Amino acid sequence: MNKNYDAIIIGGGAAGMMCAWQAGLRGKRVLVLERSKKIGRKILMSGGGRCNFTNLYVEPHHFICANPHFVKSALSQYTAWDFIASVVEHNIAYHERDHGQLFCDNKAKDIVGMLVKECEAVSVDVVFSCAVNKITCNRLEAAESKKHTEQIDKRFTITTDKGAFESASLVVATGGLSIPHMDPTPFGYEVARQFGLNVLPVRASLVPYTFSGALKEMFARLSGNAVLAEIRAGAQSFKEALLFTHRGLSGPVVLQISNYWQQSDAITIDLLPDSNVSHLLSDAKQAQPKALARTILAKALPKNVVLELEQLWWSERRAQVLADWPQSAIESVGAQFNNWEIVPAGTEGYRTAEVTLGGVDTDELSSKTMQSKKQPGLYFIGEVVDVTGHLGGFNFQWAWSSAYACAQSLP
């Protein structure tokens, strides 16, 4: 195998393989170093095995970053429609789900297969089961005069358990810390620090909540039930499905809001976001005065959910018909349904997190090229960067877009 390359990419995931493909199209000699025995493992398990590969509504506001403007350049250079065009070209059948999410009709391996085929077509070299032991940057200088020297090149030497390789550029596409069974490591962050780049604190992202005490016990009894809900954390809110679990709360709405929640903060849940429950009960009191509150509410929510909340919020009135309820009690119960404030004990952490929030500080990178401002020839792309997309294909689109932007700028 060749030992000298225009670019070496560490990481054979979505961003790494996309960058290799696009750089190869430009005639660059590219090597991908992958720690595991196969590429694209996260692609293969994503979207329930069908890969939510992008979203029809990719906009900068769907991404979380310390610098909200950072994502704009890469997303404009390579859009969702650009990736969709490649999917169509490879005859990969796909379909749209809620909120513009695009999934493969068949298996996620169709996307991996596309990346592999394109990389093979442009002669990308891939080394599997490859552990990187050391990275050094060698400055080559040439004397223009007897008085001074001018830097003319920088070459990286990557020492691995499969030998040493050299390249003019180094691309770090190592991902984050989510999904422990894939054996993730902080290697990408360590490389950034080695070359003097700041790394922002990281934590589990797009992750379920856990609870303790009576709430945990109640949610466990309701495990498997799902309702449409709106959850607020600070100034941010989302309205999607909420799922009760043995440990607490999950579902798309929980994963979304987890990005904006801080430990020990309360979240506010609206269990009937399309209804004012106080008005609902007041109207029922007039129309069905002999009805029980649970009878009315069970028309809008699963019965066992209503029974648990009855025990929690109006157990002393559970056998009392609505005609005997004072308006203050109706208002109180209605407010609980529409503004239920609770404090999660925590999250399930990286064990079930879909991505990692935080990472290489974008202030250290060019938004146009993903290149380090401090170390010429060094690039960071994908999840290792402090860019986190909302649930729904946005994180894959960031992988495609950041990889493309990097590939176009490789010398």
Image: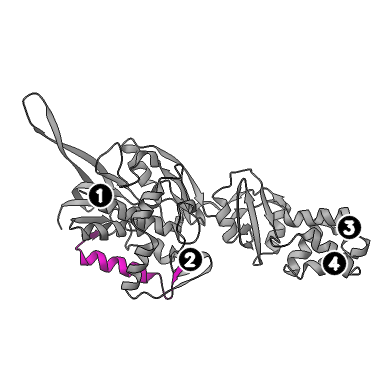
Q: Does the stretch in magenta take in 214?
A: no
Q: Which mark is residue 101?
A: 2
The first of marks 4 and 3 along the sequence is: 4
Tell me which numbered mark, 4 or 1, is placed earlier along the sequence: 4
**Residue 79: x and y, percent?**
37, 59
Q: Are marks 2 and 1 in contact (CB under 8 Å)?
A: no
**Quarter of the figure with residue 125:** bottom left
User: Does the residue at mark 1 contact the one at mark 3 (Cβ under 8 Å)?
Assistant: no
Mark positioned earlier in the residue sequence (2 or 1): 2
* Few, some or many residues within 10 Å of mark 1 (<14, 14–19, 20+): some
Helix, strand or loop at disc 2? strand
Which label's residue is closer to the chain start, 2 or 3? 2
Which residues lie in the magenta part? 100-126
In this rendering, the label closer to the viewer, 1 or 3? 1
Q: Which mark is residue 240?
A: none
Q: Position of residue 169 (x, y in %)?
A: 23, 47
Residue 363 to residue 30: above or below: above
Who's the residue at 64% across and 44% down the image? 265
Residue highlighted by disc 3 = 316
The answer to whether 146 is drawn above or below residue 166 in the figure is above
- What amino acid type is highlighted by mark number 3? Glu
Q: CA distance from mark 1 to mark 3?
A: 68 Å
Disc 3, SS: helix
What residue does disc 4 label?
A: 284
- Quarter of the rendering occupied by the N terminus: bottom left
Q: Is residue 11 visible?
A: no
At mark 4, the secondary structure is helix
Q: Find disc 1 in the rendering and name its residue.
A: 409
Task: Look at discs 2 and 3 and give the one toward the viewer.
Answer: 2
**Residue 75 visible:** yes
Q: Indicate left or right for 9 with 245 as reference.
A: left
